[in-house]
Image (cartoon, rainbow, N blue to C red):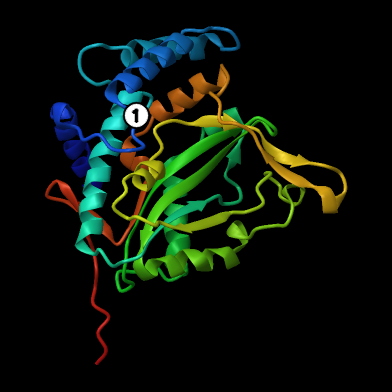
Amino acid sequence: MASLAWAMLIAVWVKLRAFCPQFEGLETELEAKKEDHERARRLLWRKGKTPEVAAASANLALRVSQVRGIPQTLGSKRYVRLIRACLAANLLKLLRLAPDERVYLVTLVPAGHAFTIDELMQVDPGLLVQRLRVTLGRCGANPRVSGWAFGYLDGEYNLATGLFQLHWHLIVTGDLIKVFQRLKRRTAYKSVKRVADSPDGVATRVHIQEVDDPQNPRPLTYAMKGSWYARWRGETGDNEDEVQRVVGPRVRIPEPYHSHVLLWLDKWEFNDMLIMTNLKLGHGTLYRVQVPNTCY
């Protein structure tokens, strides 16, 4: 039922795309259209692709490059932009309902979420959502805790390791942030001192930053990334006292890997990548689910 509700809501947004809001941190419609054109061009590259992948890429290129309407695939920048904009508008309304509630931007990089391209193509994001939901529940997430969380699955290609690191970006409000702080004590979220001590090249697995201006839409659009990118992440230096972490500039994922990512995204719906705590979708909008913590 939830999937159907999301599908119906997104269909309305697509139909009313002319009224799509524009926020700080959100690409313009023209920028999204240019990106779709570039994606279609690269999808047609055949180098490094099997005949099956090349054929699937050509089919997706045709859909992503359509001029009339919005390509309804997560492989389209225009489609994802529309969803990000409408959801950001919904979340801003929720934040205005509790202007004194503290708001946080959280990034989670669980262990075991780094994949080769072949492994990525077999990943079911719904299983990752369920795994995180269970873990949050064990850390105390429930409707009696004040606040809510809204998160989306993101991916980054590490040029140093050749692995795709899947991770979560979330907006978290109120006392629910304590649940995410408790994650740091769980094995899959424990940080280490050095990148070299981590099996997937990740030292810090839980990042929490308070949002200074909750009415600024930029953190909301950051929590719902419109594209995956590549970076070089690693360390330099052999002496432990002189080791420095290095994060390179954000660049486009090289081919044929980016085509594979778009094909993987095309397999799923937006809500497959989504996790919400103390939030529900109903009557065309998001609303809080809160149970008063009454003492008798």
Question: In the picture shown, does residue 284 fall above or below 267?
Answer: below
Given the current orientation, which residue lies at the most extreme front position?
Answer: 212
* Secondary structure at numbered mark 1: loop
Question: In the picture shown, does residue 224 fall above or below 121?
Answer: below
Tell me residue 157's x, y (percent).
58, 32
Q: Is residue 120 left or right of residue 218?
A: right
Q: Which residue lies at the image location 51% right of the left edge and 66% below the top edge?
A: 181
Question: In the picture shown, does residue 291 fall above or below 167?
Answer: below
Given the current orientation, which residue lies at the most extreme right position?
Answer: 239
Q: Which residue lies at the image location 17% right of the left edge and 33% below the top edge?
A: 13
Given the current orientation, which residue lies at the most extreme bottom position?
Answer: 296
Tell me residue 267's x, y (percent).
39, 29
Tell me residue 85's x, y (percent).
26, 37
Residue holding disc 1: 27
Q: Which residue lies at the image location 46% right of the left edge and 40% below the top edge?
A: 154
Q: Is residue 17 left or right of residue 38?
A: left
**Figure label count:** 1
Q: Nearer the viewer, residue 56 or 157?
A: 157
Does residue 96 appear in this view? Answer: yes
Residue count near mark 1 (Cα–Cα under 10 Å), binned few <14, some 14–19, many ≥20: some
Does residue 121 appear in this view? Answer: no
Q: Which residue lies at the image location 31% right of the left edge and 66% below the top edge?
A: 101
Looking at the rendered image, the quarter that the C terminus falls into is: bottom left
Tell me residue 162's x, y (percent).
66, 30
Q: Nearer the viewer, residue 110 or 84?
A: 84
Residue type at tag 1: Glu
